[in-house]
Image (spheres, helix red, strand yellow):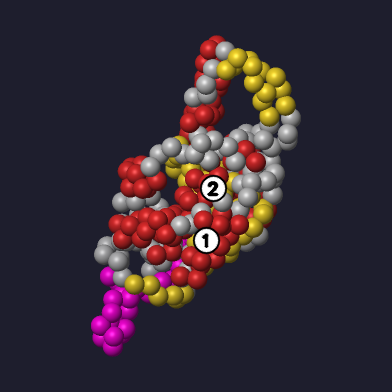
Amino acid sequence: MSSKNFFSGAFFQQLERLSVLSKGRVSSHLRGHHRSAKTGSGMIFSDYRPYVGGDDLRNLDWGIYLRLDRLVLRLFEEEADQPVYIFLDVSNSMDFGVPNKLEFSKKFSAALAYIGLINHDRVSLTTYSDNLLQVVPARRGNKQIWRTMHLLEQVKASGNTDLKTALNRFFGAKRSRGLVVIISDFLEAESWDTTFKSLRTAKHDVFAVHVSSPQERDPEVMEDILLVDSEDGGTIDFQMTQGSRDLYKQEFRAHVTSLKQFLNRLGWGYLSASTDLAFEDLFFQILKEKGLFR
């Protein structure tokens, strides 16, 4: 699918349905302004946002309500400064599968950013492979939606996968603590402890969206095939027998299990996102169960 027609009218209609159904239902795990916001001495006023049912009434600005008949919440530095950081893996291994992993992930990133922004979060989008490629800094508002969409339209697969380097370089600069959503096939050479060390140190929340294609999870038995490494171009002649297929599936499941166990141990979120899933079903059935929607 070309980037020229990637974000079609039908896709934006999907986003509108997502936005209507998600308004007021996004949990504090996704919201930049947490409903359990703290108040008290030492808190610095930062911003306003519309009141949402369930917010702390102590933070309402009654002066604005009396003048304008609008319920507006005062935000303080601690609660206003918790953005959503979206990291999109655009390495060559993502350009694989039917449906294609990268095209699926671009749509997922767009929808997640859109929902965050219409719920008044500050949202950042970063594309990476073996380094940081492009960064849309964390901001709120309608203009941020179009900045994000424009970047996603230009995305093409390139380079090897190196999440550790991308995270270290991005969070090497001073960043507000927030929710880091990583959308990737997680074909990492490093251990999970090493890869995620910078996020653990800075005490970010993390949600991993593990993207895979049907062909990766359940490859066909083929007599003679030429395997090509999508990231370094290396090749090897291979015979996919029933035995080698079963061994591959066993190793794939073990890889998935190791990632899930690591994330669960730290209290972080995990979502298995197959590219053949219906897109809206993914958001309204699976994500709700996984805690990003209430």
Instruction: Tell me if residue 10 is in the magenta stretch.
Output: no
Indicate which label's residue lies in the foreground, 1 or 2.
Answer: 2
Q: In the image, 169: left or right of 210?
A: right
- Residue at 31 percent across and 51 percent down: it is 294
- Residue at 46 percent across and 57 percent down: it is 8
Label 1: few (<14), some or many (≥20) within 10 Å? some
Considering only order in the chain, which callout, 2 or 1, is on the residue closer to the N terminus?
Answer: 2
**Tag 1, which secondary structure?**
helix
Under mark 2, the amino acid is Met
Residues shaded magenta: 57-83
Question: How far across and how far down the image is residue 76, in percent?
Answer: 43, 71
Question: How far across and how far down the image is residue 293, in percent?
Answer: 34, 51
Asked if one can make out residue 85 in the rendered structure from this viewpoint, the answer is: no
CA gap between label 1 and label 2 equals 16 Å
Question: How far across and how far down the image is residue 58, in percent?
Answer: 30, 72
In the rendered image, which residue does mark 2 sit on?
Answer: 1
CB atoms at circles 1 and 2 under 8 Å apart? no
- Residue at 29 percent across and 85 percent down: it is 68
